[in-house]
Amino acid sequence: MLETLLDYYRIAEEPLRSVCFATQTAIGDLGFFQFGRQNICYGRCSSGVASDCAGSAKFNVQDGVHGPGPAIQLPFDPAEVIENLRYERYRQQGTEGLEQLALSEPARKSYYFFRRFLPFPIRRQLQRIYFQNWKAISFPAWPVDFTVDNLHDEILRLWLEASGTKRLPFIWFWPEGAASCLIVTHDVETRAGRDFTFKLMDLDDSYGFKASYQVIPEKRYEVQDEYVHGIRSRGCEFNIHDLNHDGRLYLERTEFARRAASINGYLRRFGANGFRAGAMYRKQEWYELFEFSYDMSVPNVAHLEPLRGGCCTVMPYFIGKILELPLTTAQDYSLFHILEDYSIDLWKQQLSLIRRRNGLISFLTHPDYLIERRSRKVYESLLDYLREFVVRERIWSAFPADVDRWWRARSKMRVVPSGDGWTIAGPENHRARLAYAVLDGDHLSFELPGDPRKHAQPKQ
């Protein structure tokens, strides 16, 4: 478990090595249980598990986690639970009804075949029927889920408590001490969206933002070299969006392998490093066939995505060699056409929540849906709000590729003793900042020298 904490915080290891950490061997079925008031876990637990998240409260293992002396004893393996959540393995017990039908090969093939012939109002109505029960989904938590982040904080708190350490140095999450990170991305889904790309760039530029554009390489529209060069010459980022966006990328392993090879070919051809699957479809266990450096296909909470679930974290994390940059805010299409909300209220709420946890704030909008004036005015309001928010809250506004490079460099950094204190060793350490996890009674908070604010973590 110390390695899990190291990967997340890049902590100084020496003060914590005196703690004996033990998990009881849990056998039997995977299921749901709770660790603290907010944290629904999925995994094996020697205290028992529920078959669905609604029954998880019956198996709350918060009490009695300490052993004698400097020891921590848990009836589950936190590292296993964290991986289960990041990989969305809990979905294996939660797919039913319309979702199960929609994810089947015949249904998805039929939908994408007839989709081109269906008028937009009919498609939108079918989607609203599919999503009609989204408010009834209790896990992950809407509008942002922090379960993975909460688990890391709680385990670190227990470790500090058991070791008698009140203040532990770690490497701050973002370069130069930024409070959070913001990335703006645009998926180009149709020929009309492609043709609107440079007008959208003008709009972004007028508010001081540059974005990453994910482009479909086959069938939907022609991707000319001039178009790719135009995106990059304007100082924006170019990435690959699926193969042909027909909803079938992950349906069958052999076909997936063929498509993954084609996607890898386009990555090389266009010199791209990032990827996002069509409709946010994903199957993390198959990612080893991809050659891209980072992926942006996993939502934090996916109540309004065709594939429900969510990775339950607002921080980047590795899936093998690939860095996942989770989508942590609602898509424009979901906001406008599913929720019928033409305001930025939900986005502002998500921004505030993620900022308080110092997480990755990632936006996904589409030039295709911003052509319409009403939608574009809402997007302009968002840009205007973001412009002020970035300055006020000291947010690092970056490209996805910048976050990829930073997180990989940070993963190789270490906190090492230096005289009477600590220093950071490793690549790009000049951009890194030393922060401190502070145990205040039974509560954990973060301190960043030079920042007058104390980054208190929510109580579990």
Image (cartoon, grey):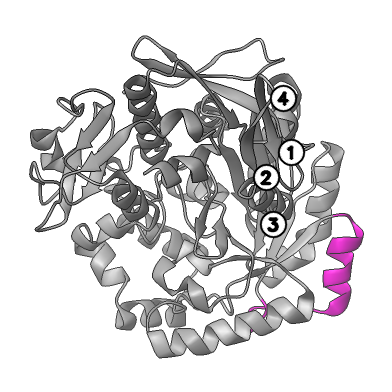
Task: Tell me, yes or no, whether the two marked residues, 1 and 2, touch with CB atoms within 8 Å.
Answer: yes
Left or right relative to 404: residue 60: left
Q: Are marks 2 and 3 in contact (CB under 8 Å)?
A: no
Q: Secondary structure at mark 4?
A: loop
Circle 1 sits on which residue?
A: 397
What segment is highlighted magenta in the picture? Answer: 217-235
**Which mark, by number, is residue 183?**
2
Calculate the distance from the C-alpha at mark 1 to the C-alpha at mark 3.
20 Å
User: Gap between marks 4 and 1, in whole Å?
Assistant: 9 Å
Q: Is residue 110 above or below residue 158?
A: below
Give amino acid for label 3: Pro
Quarter of the rendering containing residue 100? bottom left
Return the x and y of residue 413 as percentages of the image width and height. Answer: 65, 44
Q: Residue at x 84, y 62 (%)?
A: 231
**Residue 133 in picture, x, y percent from top left:** 26, 48
Residue 250 colored in magenta in the image: no
Give the residue type that dot 2 points to. Answer: Ile
Q: Describe the element under mark 2 as helix, strand or loop.
A: strand
First in sequence, mark 1 or 2: give its number.
Answer: 2
- The picture places residue 314, in percent across and down from the top left corner, at 50, 40
Disc 1 to disc 3: CB gap under 8 Å: no
Let me know if residue 220 is in the magenta part.
yes
Q: Secondary structure at mark 3?
A: helix
